[in-house]
Amino acid sequence: MTEDVALPRAVTVIARGMSIVAGLLLLGVILLTVADVVSRNARDRSIVGIVDIATMLLVAIAFLGLASAEADGRHVVVELFESRFGPRTRLVLSVIRTVLLIALALLLTWGLSEVLLSAIERGETTNDILRLPTWPAKLVLLASFAMFFVVAVWKELLTFMALRTERRGDNR
């Protein structure tokens, strides 16, 4: 059912943009890793702070693709189970999913906001040589989860409306 719903262009563009940024960051991690290996072999020393930099980039990469994956349906979906039910049961399940998504979105967004503000206030940094600030990675997490939930809730609301239309058609 989720493939029948279309998201607004702006939401899709933002989600895909975040996915492209994740891809570019992945390319950056690859280049940094190659440079570090070359440095270790050629100079017998690693690039200073490479572990901190790679860790922060990997956090961003892992979460920036969430919204795009949800928008495109490239995640694990259990529609086989739900497709066995009638329109009314699927409608009820859609409402339950929407409520749970909104509750989870509010909880995670609030929690991640608190963690981000705390990191900024305390001037939190990584523990390695470079002592990089951690707030940019935490900001990426917050933005990624927020965008994921916008896409997920929007898709579920569109699915709900499609199911409601289908159910009305069955009742005629």
Image (cartoon, rainbow, N blue to C red):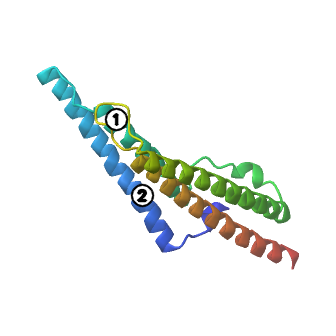
- Classify residue 50 as left or right of residue 155: left
- Circle 1 residue: 52
Label 2 residue SS: helix
Within 10 Å of disc 2 (Cα), the crowding (few <14, some 14-19, many 20+) is many
Residue that protrudes farthest toward the front in the picture: 122
The quarter of the picture where residue 51 lies is top left
The quarter of the picture where residue 84 lies is bottom right
Residue 153 position, x and y percent, is 64, 63
The quarter of the picture where residue 26 lies is top left
Label annotation for residue 87 = none
Label 1 residue SS: helix
Residue that protrudes farthest toward the bottom in the picture: 172
- Classify residue 138 as left or right of residue 108: left
Camera sees residue 76: yes
**Camera-side residue: 69 or 150?**
150
Within 10 Å of disc 1 (Cα), the crowding (few <14, some 14-19, many 20+) is some
Label 1, label 2: how many angstroms apart (C-alpha)?
Answer: 22 Å
**Camera-side residue: 36 or 168?**
36
- Classify residue 146 as left or right of residue 93: left
Q: Tell me the residue at 75%/61% (across/down).
A: 94
Q: In which quarter of the image is the C terminus?
A: bottom right
Q: Tell me the residue at 55%/70% (across/down).
A: 7
Label annotation for residue 18 = 2
**Camera-side residue: 165 or 56?**
56
What amino acid type should be assigned to the residue bearing mark 1?
Asp
